């Protein structure tokens, strides 16, 4: 992974701008008809020109052969070994809906469930109630005056989707090493939260009290008259971009989850109303002078891959390509284009296949033989095959932001 | 190396079959006449077709620049870092002759030597006596009634080759941290076995007693009237395939040593009378339904390489290729073809050069540009260059046997 101690010693100031453009799940597999992947089949004249002027490689977001989720995938891109740094499920869920998690928070994923007269679970998902119903229940709980369990502690409850919601307990000195309340079967009552260490006893007591009160609030509801909480997790104490890379970093993403992930490493979430890639680039332009590093996230490559829609994924890539001139108008010094994992439309899922990477940096790049941006071209690119955690070091080097090591 | 803890968390059941076909020492060097290696010069239409349908890479069995023996080479292929997991010489020698080593065993390599009237060594190899003589001496020792030194402890002695034999001490709770008895020069007496830690004191005492008795048995022999023991080693406690990969694994090899190596990581040795590769594939077919993973070992690529016989090594590769259709009839889901090290016939020895690897997995492979199976093609293959210890993770991923890491 990025050697933070070494980087801290070597990082030097510069006026250069680095852009990391992430096409979520961009890596693919070749289709039968012409043996081309989504990226290879897409018409990408702009990225191909960047490939000629820059160089390519391929990277493993987590590690060779390992399929990563979005959390680990982005941690890898940001230089944090996902096998070392973990983002708990509760935090990921909160971050996923754009909740601004702080270092005082213990987050949990909640499920509404159905309880019988004896308090035993009859449906762990409460008949998969629609999101609107979920929001209504959350509103009721939030209106019940139970969210300040003791001075200095505040609870936040937010709906997610269907029967799922998120609970955040905020307070000084809380620890989140807590057991889950979902018994994982029907016919059993929800379990109490049990502290897994001494430091978490206070949070366990507060969570148990709150669950009892919140359950009382929805007791008369149908079918969702109970709840279980899982994935308790404290805000992860990740080193921050400013401290390890000396970068003022901005996160631009349409989906709140990715702004949230970026905020965990100290990037500023840039609020905006952009929907298209081109609009995201415009947002970057607006804050261009305030930052050194721009994480720009494109979601729909992954979404169309998960749909199994080769052509649609290809089109998203072409839309990104068409917007590239807008990005280049900003004159970045270093541009990296890659993904947080592969999502071959053939597999309709994330995969372990390495992700092609394009590095463009006119002042410092060693051009290779690449002439197009695609998986095969990248697999023989000048950068070779490496772990994603090395990308940030490469970016800093090409941006003139790393001093020489040793004499 | 394979991250066993991570894999244990991610491994999921599947019905897929993985075949690892090892051509021992397959990697070579180009000959002067046409600049082709043994593998490149060989006519391999079947493997070339698999290269088109699959993808290539090259791997370092131990590490870059390091020439590995068969033990480390295979450990690497099996996913065990040979720089972390060591198989002691004594165990390797026992395994090499097909002795079924157990976790109660302390093994040693023995040399018959010549002693003078004062018990000093005059020839450390007893004039390199032939294997038949060695077997005769071993038989004599085994018939002398000295192999049950105390209740619950049993000695096994087996001839190996020329003046070499193997001794195994089997008993509960024995430790094998013992010094060697070979003084490494003539004119000196064999040294006593000295325990290197408290736990090994019992084995040291028992070995010293046994050596004295065994030497007495052959005292009147010529020229082999003494012995030295080296490479004392306890059965290595390697994690097992079933536990770390969730695989029922079968080892099919003509040479007992390779079945023995595989048994150390928990593979079942498949007993058979196969001599040719095609016969080995038939053996695989016979046990196909009982296993998930098949390690199939071809020895003669290495043997002919060590002979320095380029053409003969090339012919062995062609024989393997000709048998491939037989293997493909079994319809493996994942097929990996590679070697445990290079043995260029030009060097007549193992070498450190990376070993070409072919990965074929019709449902999940990312095809690259490879059209033939050979060293140069593999060096620009889509899998890049990696350590052998990553092969098993790749195999599991392509076999659908690994869940996603993180959300």
Image (cartoon, coloured by chain):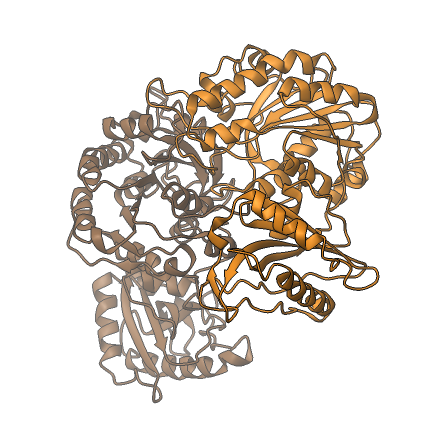
Chain colours: A orange, B brown
Q: Quick check: can you spot residue A241? A: yes
B382 and A283: which one is in front?
A283
Residue at x-position 46% and y-position 80%: B204
Q: Residue furthest front?
A: A220
Q: In the drawing, does residue B374 fall left or right of residue A370?
A: left
Could you tell me residue A348's position as x and y percent?
Answer: 42, 34
Tell me the quarter of the image containing the C terminus of chain B: top right
Could you tell me residue A404's position as x and y percent?
Answer: 78, 32
A221 and A270: which one is in front?
A221
Rendered image quadrant of residue A19: top right
Q: Residue furthest bottom?
A: B151
Residue at x-position 73% and y-position 16%: A363
User: In the image, is residue A369 above or below residue A128?
Assistant: above
Rendered image quadrant of residue B228: bottom left
A201 and B289: which one is in front?
A201
Could you tell me residue B213's position as x and y percent?
Answer: 34, 83
Q: Quick check: can you spot residue B124? A: no
Q: In the drawing, does residue A168 fall left or right of residue A343?
A: right
User: In the image, is residue A13 above or below residue A317?
Assistant: below
Q: In the drawing, does residue B231 fall left or right of residue A13?
A: left
Residue at x-position 63% and y-position 15%: A324
User: In the image, is residue A90 above or below residue B366?
Assistant: below
Q: In the drawing, does residue B217 fall left or right of residue B347?
A: left
Could you tell me residue B290's position as x and y percent?
Answer: 23, 56
């Amino acid at each position: 992974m990025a050697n933070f101690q070494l980087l801290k010693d070597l990082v030097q100031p510069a006026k250069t701008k680095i852009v990391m453009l992430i096409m979520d799940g961009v890596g693919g597999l070749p289709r039968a008809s012409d043996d081309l992947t989504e990226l290879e089949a897409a018409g990408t004249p702009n990225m191909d020109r960047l490939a000629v002027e820059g160089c390519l490689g391929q990277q493993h977001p987590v590690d060779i052969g390992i399929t990563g989720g979005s959390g680990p995938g982005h941690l890898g891109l940001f230089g944090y070994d996902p096998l070392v740094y973990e983002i708990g499920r509760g935090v990921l869920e909160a971050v996923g809906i754009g909740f601004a998690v702080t270092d005082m928070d213990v987050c949990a994923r909640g499920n509404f469930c159905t309880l019988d007269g004896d308090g035993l679970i009859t449906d762990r998902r409460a008949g998969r109630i629609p999101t609107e119903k979920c929001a209504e229940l959350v509103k009721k709980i939030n209106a019940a005056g139970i969210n300040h369990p003791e001075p200095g502690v505040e609870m936040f409850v937010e709906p997610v989707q269907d029967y799922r919601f998120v609970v955040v307990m905020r307070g000084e000195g809380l620890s989140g090493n807590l057991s889950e309340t979902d018994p994982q079967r029907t016919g059993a009552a929800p379990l109490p939260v049990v502290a897994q260490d001494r430091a978490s006893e206070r949070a366990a007591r507060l969570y148990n009290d709150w669950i009892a009160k919140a359950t009382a609030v929805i007791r008369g509801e149908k079918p969702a008259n109970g709840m279980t909480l899982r994935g308790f997790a404290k805000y992860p104490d990740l080193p921050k971009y400013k401290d390890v890379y000396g970068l003022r970093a901005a996160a631009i993403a349409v989906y709140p989850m990715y702004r949230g992930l970026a905020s965990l490493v100290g990037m500023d979430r840039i609020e905006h109303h952009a929907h298209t890639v081109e609009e995201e680039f415009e947002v970057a332009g607006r804050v261009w002078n305030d930052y050194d590093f721009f994480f720009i996230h494109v979601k729909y490559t992954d979404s169309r891959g998960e749909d199994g829609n080769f052509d649609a994924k290809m089109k998203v890539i072409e839309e990104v390509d068409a917007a590239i001139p807008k990005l280049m108008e900003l004159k970045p010094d270093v541009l990296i284009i890659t993904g947080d994992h592969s999502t071959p439309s053939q597999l309709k899922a994330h995969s372990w296949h390495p992700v092609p990477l394009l590095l463009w940096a006119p002042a410092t790049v060693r051009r290779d033989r690449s002439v197009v941006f695609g998986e095969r071209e990248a697999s023989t690119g000048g950068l070779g095959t490496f772990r994603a955690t090395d990308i940030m070091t490469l970016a800093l080097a090409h941006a003139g932001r790393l001093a020489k090591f040793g004499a």
